[in-house]
Image: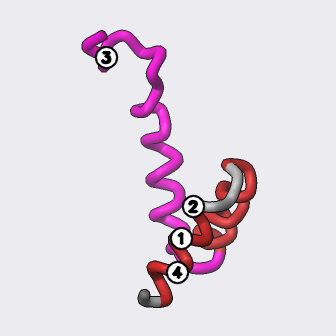
Amino acid sequence: MSIPDKIIKEIDMLSEGERQKVLDKIKEKYMARDVILLSENYAWWNNEEDDIYNDQ
């Protein structure tokens, strides 16, 4: 098993809160700031309560 596979497996075993902390640290340390801002700008797209974008 490769190192990235081991890391992903370990992250999958964390609770949701712990996983979010790890992902936030990874974003902070390794991702460019403009990528983080872009992902936050489009966070509204995943809003399940928005009837316009749901076929349900």
Q: Amino acid at mark 2?
A: Asp
Name the image colouring.
Answer: secondary structure
Q: Which residues are magenta?
A: 29-56
Measure how far apart labels 3 and 4 are at the Cα level: 36 Å
Q: Amino acid at mark 3?
A: Asn
Q: Bin the neighbour count of mark 1 within 10 Å (Cα to Cα): few under 14, some 14-19, many 20 and up.
A: few
Q: Are marks 1 and 4 in contact (CB under 8 Å)?
A: yes
Q: Could you tell me which secondary element the residue under label 1 belongs to?
A: helix
- Residue carrying label 3: 54
Which mark, by number, is residue 9? 1
Q: Nearer the viewer, residue 14 or 27?
A: 14
Q: Bin the neighbour count of mark 3 within 10 Å (Cα to Cα): few under 14, some 14-19, many 20 and up.
A: few
Q: Bin the neighbour count of mark 4 within 10 Å (Cα to Cα): few under 14, some 14-19, many 20 and up.
A: few
Name above or below for residue 47 compared with residue 16.
above
| Earlier sequence position, callout 3 versus callout 4 | 4
Q: Determine the residue positioned at 67% across, 48% down.
A: 16
Residue 25 x, y percent position in the rendering: 68, 70
Q: Are marks 1 and 2 in contact (CB under 8 Å)?
A: yes
- Residue carrying label 2: 12
Measure how far apart labels 1 and 3 are at the Cα level: 32 Å
Residue 27 x, y percent position in the rendering: 59, 68
Q: Bin the neighbour count of mark 2 within 10 Å (Cα to Cα): few under 14, some 14-19, many 20 and up.
A: few
Q: Determine the residue positioned at 52% across, 60% down.
A: 36
Q: Amino acid at mark 1?
A: Lys
